[in-house]
Image (cartoon, rainbow, N blue to C red):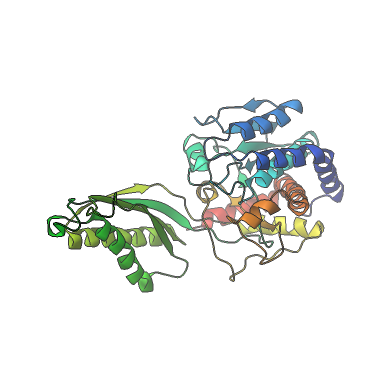
Amino acid sequence: MALDPALAAALDRAVDLHRDALTGLAKNIHAHPELRFEEHRAAGWVAELLTARGFTVERPLGGLATALRARAGHGGPRVAVLSEYDALPEIGHACGHNLIAAAGVGAFLAVASQLERTGGQVDLVGTPAEEGGGGKVILLDAGVFEGVDCAMMFHPFDRDLLAHPCLANLWLTMRFRGAPSHAAVAPWDGASALTACLQTFSLVDSQRVHFRDGVRVHGYVTDGGQAVNIIPERAACEFSVRARSLDELNRVRAVVERCARGAALAAGVEVEIVARRGYKDMRNNLALARELGRHLEGLGRHPRETDSRVGSGSTDMGDISHAVPSIHPWLAIVNEGEALCHQHAFARAAESDAGLETMLAAAKAMARTAMSFLTDAPLRAAVRAEFEASP
């Protein structure tokens, strides 16, 4: 059942009503980037905007000081719209989380304005620390998403995609410990931790031929020794391991760990391997994603479902998608090929007029999609059936 055009228009007007506040929020967050779990100003600005419009804001939430939630409506199905607002070291909002934050708030305000007319519930959930902290995973474990029937957010990109994959991932830290000695006087008395560290990279590279399509393994040396004339007693590195499924992630993890142990054995040193929990792969709910696509078309955008020419990253929205039917569309804030996430040019685009217009379009499209879900029982049934059929 198509969304009532009058209701769609009312949602659009509600976003436009808050246009100045939403763009101001996006600009403020962009101008004051905060790293994972430190987004105190960003969370405060989101909370202030919502409070000024009559909503009660739960803060902190799920044990996280910079997480928050606002709710509207009662009874019926319940939609969660998610806002991220953490930044990256050195390059600030080069992932455009400032736009994600404002778009989520805009969609929430629009849906909330119509709930007396339609029924249903909507939550705005502020989710910190997507960049390596797993804020959504922590909130999920704390029960924040219990009772939610579907969840959604958008992410800036260089093209419009409805259901592009995101990879399961985790982080592995290897700490090597050997024996020091003078590198010129008695190198034979030493056991080089750095040799084992560097050989780990070589061994991982040798195994890439056995990785499935979509696997990504990349790392860097975090400790490469202490002085040039000392056989390094310690060295360390960190790897990010990504794959299209949890099963393949676990297989590749075992390969990478085996490489580290083999390198340590060859160099005659010890290795300690510590795994840091990552994110699950993204299960895009196509029934819901295609509904959002129809609304984007109505707003003058022409999204594709996915695009095999571009790679995939990872997001803690993947964990939400394994627990609740979810979507994570990508919407362009630059021309195709002009810039991508984690680049300086993308950070500049996240405060540009084009970026702000995409943020408003995302707010409208998510508001329309959330309202479709709340008012269309056959759509809800299709969304749920697809979710339950997921492996």
Give the total of numbered labels. Answer: 0
Q: Residue furthest front?
A: 185
Q: Is residue 77 visible?
A: no
Name the spot of residue 313 as percent of width and height, x first: 53, 58
Name the spot of residue 163 as percent of width and height, x first: 62, 60
Question: Who is closer to the viewer here, 298 or 255?
Answer: 255
Q: Is residue 149 visible?
A: yes
Question: Who is closer to the viewer here, 9 or 347?
Answer: 347
Name the spot of residue 30 as percent of width and height, x first: 67, 43
Residue 365 as seen in the image, left or right of residue 198? right
Q: Residue at x 73, y 52 (%)?
A: 355
379 over 23 or under it: above or below:
below
Residue 292 as seen in the image, left or right of residue 309? right
Question: Who is closer to the viewer here, 304 or 111?
Answer: 304
| Image quadrant occupied by the N terminus | bottom right
Name the spot of residue 271 as percent of width and height, x first: 23, 52
Residue 67 as seen in the image, left or right of residue 301? left
Q: Residue at x 71, y 55 (%)?
A: 292
116 over 162 or under it: above or below:
above
